[in-house]
Amino acid sequence: MARKPTHQSADRLGYSGNADPAYLQQQINSLQGLVQSLCQAQAVENLMINGVEKWSEVLAPLRDLGPKRRKMPDDTKKILRAVHESLGRPDYSKWSLGSKPNPLQSGEYSA
Amino acid sequence: MIPQLVQRLGGRDTDALTVLSADPFDLILHMEQVWDAANPDIVSFGRQNLWNLGRFAPNAPVPDGTAPAWDHLGYGYALENTRVVQIFRRVVREYRMGEGLGIPSPETQQWLNTSEALLFGAANPIASWQSTSLVRPDSEAVRRNAYWRLFGLDLAFGGDDNNAPVYDKANAANVTFVGLFEELLFELWQAMTNERNTSGVNNADDDRIYRLAEQLRFILSSRRQANMLKREELAAATALGWADLTLRLDSPLVVDLRAQATSPGDRLRMIGERVGLPAHSKSAAFFSMAADLSVFLRTIESGAVAGPELAWILYVAKDSGDTGQEIGNESRRVITEWSAATGKDLKSRGKPVEVSRTRLMAVQ
């Protein structure tokens, strides 16, 4: 035998005389899903209306969490250029397998 | 010093052969010029006039005192681990003491003269910067001492007879170098793999890279106060540069020993087999890494990475950077080859690199 509703909210839910807890839980879950999908639609709609740029501004502070760089100062460029130039060496790959024959074997070189 | 001289001559293989066939006295005079260029405050007119008599005097580096025109000691360490010096010692001995290796050509005999002067202390009008004397007569022991002090590392092998090496092991040594260095390489690899990461978790940590680089610079500089180890570094760069150049092409020695190949590692392996002393099994990795390791360590020591905001200098590739001075290419090569040489996978790990392991793999 079905139980009577205990308060008015049951009427608003379209109470049809079934107060089974499992049935009520199913109704609540259904409503929760509806609200969630509405919220997501609102977020997408918001993004479409306001554009990505506004969201970029909102999220800008998060960029500080990433690595920050600055351009290489002139004195640093000078230091690194000196390192590279002082250690310059030939391109050996053109020697061992290169385009020209070995000068020893071709007779180009003589002591 | 030797590869840089070839580059200043034009960088061709014929220039390499010009250097390989040079008189040892010319090379030693040039060595003095390179030393003076890196120490412009020390002026001696008599010495400078003497140095200018050499064949390579017009090719001397421009004196500026900021970056010496020879490779970092790390270059010498990497190449010496191939065992090239000990193998060449046996080659010289075999050629000088008999005809077991055949009759050397005139070019090879010239190479023997220079090798004995640059590597093994033969008498010359001016003694080369071998950093040796009656107090420390063995140049290999001097280099081992320098490697120990600067990197806290020994070579991966003993003496020529495989006995434990005998040299003065200084108390003041950078025994933390390997731990810091490998930690830095790991962080650099993380930054490289995240360089183009626009979504997802970014593991690049510029602040840590900076701190590790700074710490490395501190410990390296602490061994170099008042130009300490500078002369030893030039001696090592010259000796190993000579050996390096000999194996970079089918030089007269390589041809005479019938060790023609397409890579220095293979040439060394075959020469080692001729004289009964095997080269390091990871020689290819050492040859491939040596020059880039030199640039990498020089950059660290230069102090160019002056803050976390400049850590990118160490991992951005040269062709994708905005100045062309970044050393990402060199760093990548060092990471790959150091991993191959040591057997440690620096590209992926679940815990920090083992700091206590200071030795490279033994010769196999």
Image (cartoon, coloured by chain):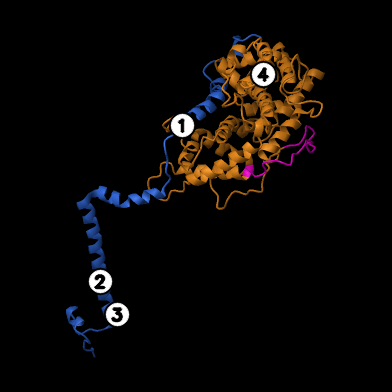
Chain colours: A blue, B orange
- Chain designation of label 4: B
Q: Which mark is residue B32?
A: 4
* Residue nearest the viewer, comparing B41 with A36: B41
Side (left or right) of A1 relative to B86 = left
Q: Is residue B172 magenta?
A: yes
Q: Write the start and end of the magenta stretch as one range.
A: B157-178
Distance of mark 4 from mark 3, alpha carbons? Answer: 94 Å
Distance of mark 1 from mark 4, alpha carbons? Answer: 33 Å
Q: Which mark is residue B318?
A: 1
Q: Given the image, on which type of amino acid does mark 1 rest? A: Lys
x 42%, y 40%: residue = A69
Side (left or right) of B283 relative to A41 = right
Helix, strand or loop under label 2: helix
Q: Given the image, on which type of amino acid does mark 2 rest? A: Ser
Q: Earlier in the sequence, mark 1 or mark 4?
A: 4
Asked whether the residues under marks 4 and 3 belong to the same chain, the reply is no
- Chain designation of label 2: A
Label 2–label 1 contact, CB within 8 A: no
